[in-house]
Image (cartoon, rainbow, N blue to C red):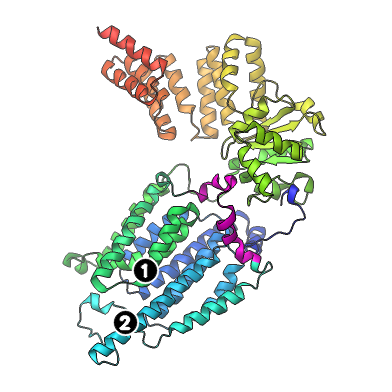
Amino acid sequence: WSWPTYGAPDVNWSWGFSALLWPVWERAGVWGLFAWRWVTALVAFGFLWGAARRMGARGFAPLVVMVVCSLVWRARSQVRPETLAAVLLAAELWILETRRQGGKDHAWWLVPLAWVWANVHNTWFLGFAVLGFHALDDLLGRRGRAGRVRSRGQTGPSPVPRSAPAAARTAPPARGAQSPARLLWVGLAALAISFANPFGWRALWQPFDFFLHHRDEPIFRSIAELHPVAWGDYWQRGLPLLVAGWPLLALWRARRRGPDWVELACCAAFTALALSALRFVGLYALVAAPYVGRDLDEWLPRPAWLLRAPLASRAALAALACVAAGWAEWSRPEYPLGVGILWNKYPVAACDFMEAHGVRGRGFNEFGFSGYPLYRFWPDRTRLPFIDIHQAGTPADRSLYARAEGSDEAWGALDREHRFDYALLPRGLFGRYGLLDRLDADSTWALVFLDDLMALYVRRSGPLDPVASEVAYRVLPGGAKRFGPLAAACERDSLLRARAAAELTREIAGSPAHAQALLLLSSLAMIEGRHDDARALVARSLAVEPLRGGGHMRLALIALEQGRPREALNEAARERAIVGANAALDVLTGSAWARLGEKSRARAAYRRALAREPGNAEARDSLAALERGAG
């Protein structure tokens, strides 16, 4: 899937998922992909709710827990092999908990389940971990029962009368017929059949090979989902509450009833996995769901008024709790509700340009954006990426690639080794700004395409030199470093300003993702004193990308210039909601308050700016001017 490794043996441990998903995409399109997400999530949480019921959970509390856990799972529910692994993991929990609670023993169903898992996702080993926890519980349970029989002279547990308290009635029934050896044989059979995949032992070895040999490579350390949990991204989904609440509930139940070794083992193992790497957070939420549902159901008090309430009233209360739990997550503007693909997150326009102008050859790319060009151009081998989403390549190439962002030496070595014809680099998501700035400063490269998402460079002294001569940008850079000097030069030079405006207009015409270009055009309009034109350009920019930073800041500046400080404050607040607080916004806010005569609020804003950025000259000078005026 990449040109340097074309023809090398491939170990595709998710081939089964691709084989199942492709007909869905081919026949049902985008709606089919969304249906995949809906069905896999509903089936997985259906199994988990069933497992909680088997463990004794009743009422509506477990359903609320399912919603909370599904919000955590939502971040991992893209159409990816993990969605199928979720169903398999949930089915395994249901099978094993049904068996553990005295229901029908379907443990042998785990053998075909393991075979499917080994062919669709590299988390297959987690199924064996859960199986091992249950085998250990069988062993501990048998020893515990034998000890009780010897001490009491009984041949089995005494029956629990229906008049006993609810807590006693929900205790797990006896499992005297269960044999610890049974799960051992099931596990051995499941492991043996897992080798029945197109890649044999190599597919099973992949997760261990990564852990032992590759996880410390710089390229893998740059991948966000391999980092520890970023709590700021997950608090709205309820993850902190889940991570804190599950062990507390498990320990409360262990103190009250005795330890549930399966739950304690799952809690320890999957919490450690989730905290160590973001990619395990979704599977952690799945495993937590049935146990937290059961424990919470036992822990919650049941006042008399609630027990006397009609069933419909209790159901409505649970439904309100579900909506309340999900509201913060569902209302996030960066994750709009709807059915569709956000094409402005993919290099669609850049690939259109490549096709129209014959850009091909040895390309360099960001691995996070390798999928769309592969899909778009396959089977054209002349446009394969340099590195794919699974970071295929030699260790030396991966090392140089990871360091090329910040090192002239690494980029030079990589380019000398492969002699790239073009470089397709991101400007927004996964943006590698250092490399953009480096190519801007290198006269042997020409920037030929630009939009909010991507920048495309071609080498001048090569087969793409005619493209460079015909359509290269002469003024605009792809990176951020040259924008400041360019803006200052445009203020002084009207001819340069006109050339920059023409290139921005070309950028806007070349891609629907042009919010940044509209903002830059508005800056040129403000230099020329055309504030109404600037305001209209910013409005167009926000229509293209409502959550892009800088738009409301520009509107606030225009409002100040036109003598509307109250409007400037409102726009500054909107900008702060998108990008967070910063010194520039504090300075602008201080200026607006000063225009309104609110000098104490202006001073406070300037002081906040200096606290965030002690060297901010504008904040320091503005505060000094206020102090002199007060004196």
Residue corresponding to mark 2: 144
Left or right, 519 with respect to 599, comes to right
Q: Residues within 10 Å of mark 1 (few under 14, many from 20)?
A: many
Q: Quadrant of residue 111?
A: bottom right
Residue corresponding to mark 1: 263
Is residue 218 rendered magenta in the image? yes
Number of numbered discs visible in the structure rendering: 2
Residue under the image location 65 percent in, 41 percent down: 401
Residue under the image location 19 percent in, 83 percent down: 163
In the rendering, at what x and y percent does residue 631 appear? Answer: 24, 6
Amino acid type assigned to the residue bearing label 1 in the image: Glu
Nearer to me, 191 or 230: 191
Marks 2 and 1, the one that precedes in the sequence: 2
In the rendering, at what x and y percent does residue 4 appear? Answer: 74, 47
- Residue 68 lies, with reference to residue 433, above or below; the image says below
Is residue 380 rendered magenta in the image? no
Chain part drawn in magenta: 202-227
